[in-house]
Amino acid sequence: MTNSGCILEMYDIRKEFPGVLALDRVQLSLKKGEVHVLLGENGAGKSTLMKILSGAYTKDSGEIFIDGNLTEIMSPAHAQELGIGIIYQEFNLNPYLSVAENIFMGREPVKLPGIIHWERLYREAQTILDSLNVKINARHKVESLGVAMQQMVEVAKALSLKARILIMDEPTASLSNNEIESLFKTILHLKQQGVSIVYISHRLVEIFEIGDRVTVLRDGKYIATTPIEQLTRDDMIRMMVNRDLDDQIPKVKAIIGETVLKVENLNVNERLKEINFELHKGEILGISGLMGAGRTRLAKTLFGAEKIKSGSIYLEGREVFLKSPRDAINAGIGLVTEDRKTEGLILDLSVKQNISLPNIKRFIKGGVINFKKENEVVDEYIGKLKIKTPSRNQQTLFLSGGNQQKVVLSKWLCTDTKIFIFDEPTRGIDVGAKTEIYQLMNRLTANGAAIIMISSEMPEILGMSDRILVMRDGRIAGELSDKEATQEKIMNLALGEPYEAAV
Amino acid sequence: MKQLFSNLNFDQMRQFGTFFGLLALCILFTILSPHFFTTSNLLNVAQQSAIIAVISVGMTFVIITAGIDLSVGSVLAFSGVVMASVLHSGLPIPIGIAVGMAVGFSCGLVNGMLVTYGKIPPFIATLGMMSIARGAGLWFTDGRPISGFDDSFRFLANGEIFHIPVPVIIMILVYVAAHFVLTRTKMGRYTYAIGGNINAARLSGININLYLNIIYGVAGLLSALAAVMLTARLNSAQPIAGIMYELDAIAATVIGGTSLFGGKGTVIGTLIGALIIGVLRNGLNLLGVSSFIQQIVIGSVIIGAILLDTNLKNSKN
């Protein structure tokens, strides 16, 4: 049997996805009525662990005890029956139905089969809402509520399912300070009623205010569980990032030349503003930050795919106005997108057709595509980048992740690209292909290209960058040279200044 | 033979399948009716299929971009009556045809602009145009057909060059040109790219709006060309012409292996699809099957082709 007093215990949880060990012998224990903070970088395994707990994924191995009994969580419905509720960042509410209808969706009280007992529906929903101490009318439509109140509806829905374990994924991400205060009141209220909460957040300030214990995950591994009062902010950061940087990243420094790109006071919207930086010839500028910090939006903006509100972009000293990706490509900018399947490749088309898509003009003579020339160039890149494909006519759908990524890279290598923007260049690809991509970056910078590399992988950012910008909340939070940069410093900037929110 | 097939990808095999389907139908009707496999009847089938086949080319381009054009039949009628009235006013035939083509192209362009700048789903934009063009044609003619044209105009339907009917020649020229554009030009490559993944296409620097407008415009233009062929054949331009042609064109395209989800398809497949529909109609007529039952058969063929398609694909993946 297991520790008494724990409502939930998870031991040795393992989950493998093709090519990635997402969770490796992870453990988590939850006491009755505690707020348990789950902490870790992007990709540390928090979401995977919570999806296993809520029945969305099944674990490969490991044991889960609920109230001391060994339990297999079979499905999301089964997790609900076990009293596990999860509130995602994206709410699962129907905005055009009433609060009460949403709370009892699929479980409406009925008078006769198929006839909803409306009075009971509203009354019971209102009882739950009142028990949360929130002022929401169960008869109002969800769309009339603010984000914070919609979240309360989600909480009420979970409670109506008799949830004893409530998972909250970044619950304060889109709340104002006042709304956060009222959320915390509700959380304290739930604690008193004996509900246990798994609280995922990157906002360390909040964690100190609301948390009881902290479990840290890093790279899919369990690091430690500690009462919060025994930790400092620096301890937490250290636990999150303190990995050995023994990864052999084959960085070769190039000669850093003149400025090729200068961004001045760029504003796009609330999620990307006040951006200033320069990029030099031969340089790899790493951009780090948590998910949602605005990194991809910055990449898209530099590529002409976002509307600029104000500010200027200079290429080699001349101001440019990038109104579409076409403008950016013509100006010598190439974007290797974060998601190659939805934005990088056209999966139904062949290796050849994908590679030549941005450069088809090069192969056209008298309005007609010169297949011979196209094939030659495509074959050259298939050879140069060692793309493993049965032929240039193979649909990219059937290639492995690493080879797909090489096809995307080839698209920009064979255009006249001077500035490469890599958004998570090695996500989901195997170690061998990773190294090849790093070597390719070295060759590019040696030849005088400039690279902006967005990455969530610390070893990659620290290993490959000549300079690092850290983004937070749509702004550049700080800049670090490759000499001064450490995992702790990056994470410190990514997480934000100690206690700026509540002051 | 086995070697040959192992080298083909699914889409190429699919095309062979459609072709064998057409062949099988021809063999079947040859066995069942002595009148089927004769030069005159086969030319007759080609001639009857030509109009739908021409419209289907535009439809194929549109569907490859993951769109749809429901307005082709109405645009045919509207551009037909406008052309006819120009011809009746005594202006030279080329001017009449040019005006008709301009009307067709403009209607298509409006579709394109609604889809691109208006961001309206193609189904709705072209559904609106279907009604607008139909109404415009009826209003323009007060609901009456415009009939009686010079023999030199009617040559476009009844004439022969080297014993081949002119409509068949027009059809072949359109298909050769379309196949060339789709496989050999930038425009063709972009057509597939837009339908395959519009985001990736945009991020590869393709001017999506420009190409979609051209494609919808050309679909309208080809409807107008079909109007020329139909008007010449009937010696009459009718405001109620071309009703339900959009469905035949969609059927030919889909039977030919073009995916309604976009990104895939060939005009050769569409030609085979149009011929399958033409052969079915012709063969069933020869066998004396009632036109009511013909509709049932053609509907079943459409569904059967797609059922086969989807299930083969699922079993393959």
Image (cartoon, rainbow, N blue to C red):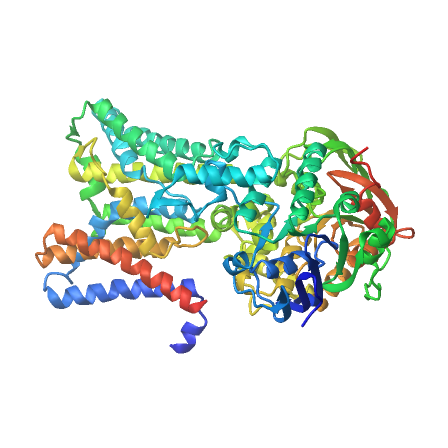
Looking at the picture, tell me which residue is in the foreground, B59 or B49. B59
Asked whether residue A99 is in view, the answer is yes
* Spot occupied by residue A416 in the image (x, y as percentages of width and height): 69, 48
Q: Up-down: is B31 above or below A343?
A: below
Q: Going 69% across and 39% down the picture, which residue do you hit?
A: A185
Q: Is residue A341 left or right of residue A46?
A: left
Q: Going 33% across and 32% down the picture, which residue do you hit?
A: B129
* Spot occupied by residue A143 in the image (x, y as percentages of width and height): 52, 33
User: Which residue is situated farthest in the bottom direction here?
Assistant: B2
User: Which residue is situated farthest in the left direction here?
Assistant: B288
Q: Is residue B122 left or right of residue A449?
A: left
Q: Give residue B314's quadrant in the image.
A: bottom left
Q: Up-down: is B21 above or below A299?
A: below
* Spot occupied by residue A85 in the image (x, y as percentages of width and height): 58, 52
Looking at the picture, tell me which residue is in the foreground, A68 or A10. A68
Q: Up-down: is A203 above or below B264?
A: above
Looking at the picture, tell me which residue is in the foreground, A358 or B131. B131
Q: Up-down: is A333 above or below A350?
A: above
Picture mark count? 0
Q: Going 17% across and 31% down the picture, which residue do you hit?
A: B149
Quarter of the picture containing the N terminus of chain B is bottom left
* Spot occupied by residue A293 in the image (x, y as percentages of width and height): 72, 43
